[in-house]
Amino acid sequence: MTQKSQLAQHGLFDAKVPRYTSYPTSPHFNNDVDAGLFSDWVSAIKPNSEISLYIHVPFCRRLCWFCACRTQGTQSDSPVRAYLEVLKSEIKMLGRILPEGVRLSRLHWGGGTPTLLAPDMMAQLAGSIAEIAPFAPDAEFSVEIDPNEIDKARLDALAAAGMNRASIGVQDFDPEIQQTIGRIQSFDITRDAIEMIRARGTSSLNADILYGLPHQTTERMTQSVQKLLSLSPDRVALYGYAHVPWMAKRQQMIPSEALPAPQERLELYDTARKLFLWDKYTEIGIDHFATQTDGLTRAQQAGTLKRNFQGYTDDQSEVLIGLGASSISRFPQGYAQNAAATSVHTKAIRNGQFSTARGHVLRGEDRLRARLIEALMCDFRISSAEILGAFNICDAALQQLYAAASHSFPEMLQISSEGLYIPKHARPLTRMIARSFDAYDLSKAGHSSAI
Ligand SMILES: C[S@@+](CC[C@H](N)C(=O)[O-])C[C@H]1O[C@@H](n2cnc3c(N)ncnc32)[C@H](O)[C@@H]1O
Ligand code: SF4
């Protein structure tokens, strides 16, 4: 049997599964977590510890049709300035309850398009953050940059604020694909943005590209990846295009008949993957590639790779605080998500309250299952010694969990005295295998194609 027909037999081309950037995944969040609990969790952070901070900017100048991110279009600066004031108040409120001596190991500005902030707004935002929590030594400050929405003045402001990592959206270089997904971005604009970013000393550059886009063929994928490689990104996120027009209404502009079939998506992924590997990139988890010296590669080799809401990370902080509309925070106690609508978020902050609307208190087997899933997503293996040492579970119960996964994926998993391992040929099934360790109602859990 070919690898493809084996994968088909296991349902790879039909299944919808979560991306497991958290466990439980956000559709399972409930109303148990409110602003009071969020404040308690912040107050319980260890004094003098290092945490990560995420700031969400839910605005874009253009709204790309393919995009499933939570963002709104605006041509004027006034809603953005108003939102900045809200963010500054929220940061101050956080500062009032943050324990003594807490520093930032990571700061990430995402969106939407954080680079639509004018240079003075960027300086204000960075200044407010620095007032409540300074950077730790070796901190990383990363920003999502739309190459169409950046210029020298804004990059100067970001460099002055300490940005040392940038992430740019590329998606695909092919003009017909760009037209069909409503995102026009010439190669020259992307190259110029990268040159400007690097000229300011930003040491690491990530690029996002997508497979599974309308009109994408393996030839076009090859050309796009080769163009991207000519720009030498340090990291690449190769995401599967999630076509969810019932959730992201903009996607109704995309003709579904032009989308590649699931089997073709696998070929597109494999085509891009081979090109990155030929170019000596290391494969990181299910959808990232990184140079030999990149932090993700080092973390993978050291077994310390982690998964968070932004995807793969080498960040080891146990606390990630998300500020801004819809942002999610992660604490050892659980998850807390802010109100998704900017208006609701704004109202809460103007009333002097955090906008926490939902979340999840970790209980029972949640932490154990979260780690089993994270280990599979990051390392394609579960170490029995690690799990038995870290969690209150006996070997027989762990073996039962392995057996249940193995029963769902016969001949695809290797189980030994060391633990459970997903061999290379079975790795396209990783998210589906991870799902077999998920105890929540799966009908609610995921909307994106398994490949
Ligand atoms: C917030 S956006 C990028 C930042 C910036 N606004 C830009 O467009 O360059 C983050 C990334 O999410 C990914 N993304 C957005 N919609 C997606 C979808 N429907 N399926 C898969 N990935 C998607 C894209 O690769 C995009 O670069
Ligand atoms: S891809 Fe970026 S610029 Fe386009 S709509 Fe999404 S967040 Fe905005």
Image (spheres, rainbow, N blue to C red):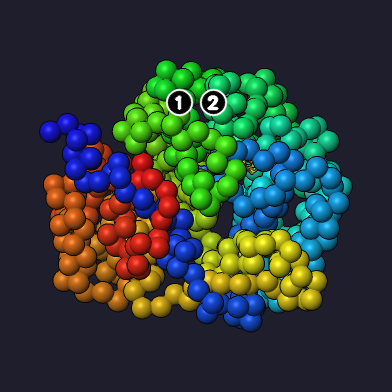
- Above or below residue 399? Residue 142 is above
Where residue 202 appears, as percent x and y from the top left, is: 67, 37
> Along the line of sight, which residue is nearer the eye, 20 or 313?
20
Mark identifier at residue 127: none
Q: Under 8 Å from ligand 1: the CB of mark 1?
A: no
Q: Secondary structure at mark 1?
A: loop
Q: Amino acid at mark 1?
A: Gln
Which residue occupies 83% across, 58% down? 82
In the visual, does 270 lie left or right of 68? left
Task: Tell me which numbered mark, 1 or 2, is placed earlier along the sequence.
Answer: 2
From the viewer's perspective, tell me whether residue 438 is left or right of residue 295. left
Label 2 residue SS: helix
Taking depth in this image into account, of 251 and 279 the one nearest to the observer is: 251
Which residue is at the front of the view, 31 or 313? 31
Q: Which residue is mark 1?
A: 216
Quadrant of the picture in which ligand 1 is shown = top right
What percent of the width, then of the height, locates residue 175? 58, 21
Q: Residue 377 location, x and y as percent?
A: 37, 51
Q: Residue at x 31, y 58 (%)?
A: 435
Amino acid beneath label 2? Ile
Which one is in front, 9 or 398?
A: 9
Relative side of 215 to 413, left or right: right
Residue 353, relative to residue 156: is it above or below?
below
Residue 166, position in %: x, y? 64, 40
**In which quadrant of the rendered image does the N terminus lie?**
top left
Q: Is mark 2 within 8 Å of ligand 1?
A: no
Left or right of 389? Residue 325 is right
Residue 126: name its quadrant.
bottom right
Q: Whole-Å distance between the Cαs marked 1 and 2?
A: 7 Å
Residue under circle 2?
177
- Mark 1 near mark 2, Cβ–Cβ under 8 Å? yes
